[in-house]
Amino acid sequence: MSTSTGDTPAGEATPTDLRAAAADFTWLLNRFATETAGVVDAIAVSSDGLLIAVSELREHADSERLAAIVSGITSLAAGASGNYGLGGLNKVIIDLEGGHVLVSSIGSGAVLGVVTDKEAKLGNIAYEMTVFANRAGSALSPQLVLELKNTVGAAKQSQQDRHRHQSRTR
């Protein structure tokens, strides 16, 4: 089936639409991270454990490590759910001496991972995570998740290239 222009099958997003949606998703994540008091870092991770969006609060390597942590937490939560019949993931909150790690489902199997400082008001953070999930998660589709993975991968490569260039010019 085609649209009236015959270019794209009905219901499929064009590459331009996907790029715009990926930029919007990343912007929403950055806005959440920078405007929510107490947030130290925030990322979005796909169901296969790969980064789909990162805040600009930390280095990309920190985001990669946080993605592995969030993926592990998600897996543990799924194990507990399966073992005890507790249903799907809502939120996981880890209370640590110096802060918190929160993980929340945002749609299409993706999760939001957040690190906060110790003074963070968890009720406010959890509320803002829910607002983010409602805004950004409703747009997540398998095609958008793939576009986001590609966008994060390209950004990582660009950052590595800049570091190599800076190392050579010193």
Image (spheres, grey):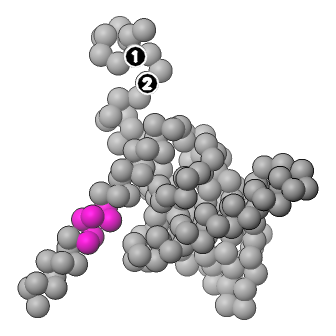
Amino acid at the residue labelled 2: Glu
Q: Quadrant of the N terminus?
A: top left
Q: Residues within 10 Å of mark 2 (few under 14, many from 20)?
A: few
Q: In the image, residue 132 lies at what x, y percent?
A: 61, 54
Q: Which residue is mark 2?
A: 12
User: Residue visible at 38% across and 58% down?
Assistant: 152
Count of numbered circles in the view: 2
Disc 1 target residue: 9
> Identity of the amino acid at label 1?
Pro
Let me know if residue 100 is in the magenta part.
Answer: no
Labels 2 & 1 near each other (Cβ < 8 A): yes
Up/down of 91 relative to 61, above or below:
above
Q: Residue at x 16, y 85 (%)?
A: 167
Front residue of 100/47: it is 47
Q: Relative to residue 23, is residue 6 drawn left or right?
A: left
In the figure, residue 139 lies in which quadrant? top right
Q: Secondary structure at mark 2?
A: loop
Query: Residue drawn at (31%, 61%), measured in percent from left and top?
Result: 155
